[in-house]
Image (spheres, helix red, strand yellow):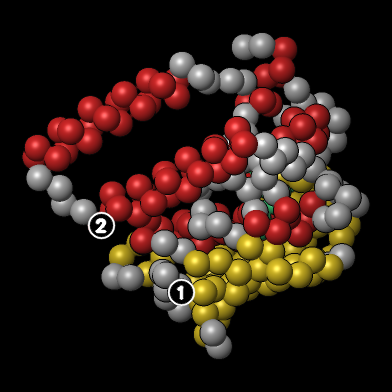
Amino acid sequence: MTSLDSLDGIAMAKRRGRRLEDTPHTQAYREMLAAVRGFQNAVVQANPSPEELAQMTASLQEMQAMLEAQAVPEVERWYGRGGGRDGKLQLVTPQLRIDVVEEDRIQAHTVAEEFYIGMNGAMHGGIVAAIFDALLGRMASGAQGRVCRTAYLTTNYRAITPLNERLDLVAKVESVERRKRFVSGQLWHGDTLCAEADALFVELLPGHQ
Ligand SMILES: CCCCCCCCCCCCCCCC(=O)SCCNC(=O)CCNC(=O)[C@H](O)C(C)(C)COP(=O)(O)OP(=O)(O)OC[C@H]1O[C@@H](n2cnc3c(N)ncnc32)[C@H](O)[C@@H]1OP(=O)(O)O
């Protein structure tokens, strides 16, 4: 562990929350992550032949070794940064695009690819919750970039959330009490409310992880 691995949560978030500089090198990283997304979508849809599987496994192991040789401490990583209206460089959820940011309300949209499938064309419920965690966390963070953690997040699934279709999201601050921000969110497919969530985010204190 290096000294940079042991920053407190606020210091780490301030370092990791900075927008990633746009250089040919970081652009190449963005393109690689987009290729990984494409690969994930292809993986879940294909039943390759044994020969193809052996070939792909060998290639993947080679690429994994290349990446492992370039591993850096969390604070220096590009993964998870990005920010702005195009969302972060990450693979946990579909890419979230922020359309409107107000003091107590955010509007965003996304399209979830095949990788995020649960069953029978519906998005996996854990991914729906992860989308809310990211969006509501962004809402709690606000323009000031408060560093918060999720204390609880309750998701209600009202209708199937479809893949490969535009989904609209809205997040609101319901109330604020000291370090606590109670926020809510909705996920819509057209006129259909697919899911809604209530969450509490607590602002970290210096020294908190
Ligand atoms: C579209 C988007 C594009 C992206 C664009 C980038 C945006 C960039 C932002 C990203 C945002 C990501 C957001 C992800 C965030 C995680 O996913 S974090 C990971 C999941 N969460 C965790 O691991 C948290 C684990 N829990 C903890 O660390 C601690 O319990 C907490 C939550 C920090 C609270 O601990 P604490 O600071 O010691 O607080 P504590 O004194 O116990 O309690 C403070 C108050 O909260 C209350 N409280 C605490 N926990 C609870 C609870 N579970 N239930 C009810 N009340 C509670 C207490 O009762 C107390 O209330 P009051 O006495 O003030 O009335």
Question: Could you tell me if residue 136 is visible in this image?
Answer: no
For residue 108, above or below residue 14 = below
The kind of residue on which mark 2 rests is Gln
Residues under labels 2 and 1: Cα distance? 17 Å
Q: Residue at x 35, y 54 (%)?
A: 41
Residue 209 shown left or right of residue 181 in the figure: left
Give the residue at mark 1.
165
- In the rendered image, which quarter contains the N terminus? top right
Q: Is label 2 in contact with label 1 (beta carbons under 8 Å)?
A: no
Residue 90 shown left or right of residue 64 in the figure: right
For residue 185, above or below residue 3 = below
Residue 19: x percent and y percent? 74, 42
Label 1: few (<14), some (14–19) or many (≥20) C-alpha neighbours in 10 Å: few
Q: Name the secondary structure under disc 2.
A: helix
Q: Name the secondary structure under disc 1.
A: loop
Residue sticking out furthest to the bottom = 191
For residue 192, above or below residue 84 = below
Location of residue 140 by image quarter? bottom right
Q: Residue at x 23, y 27 (%)?
A: 58
Location of residue 106 by image quarter? bottom right
Label 2: few (<14), some (14–19) or many (≥20) C-alpha neighbours in 10 Å: few
Give the residue at mark 2.
45
Residue 61: x percent and y percent? 30, 26
Question: Could you tell me if residue 168 is visible in this image?
Answer: yes
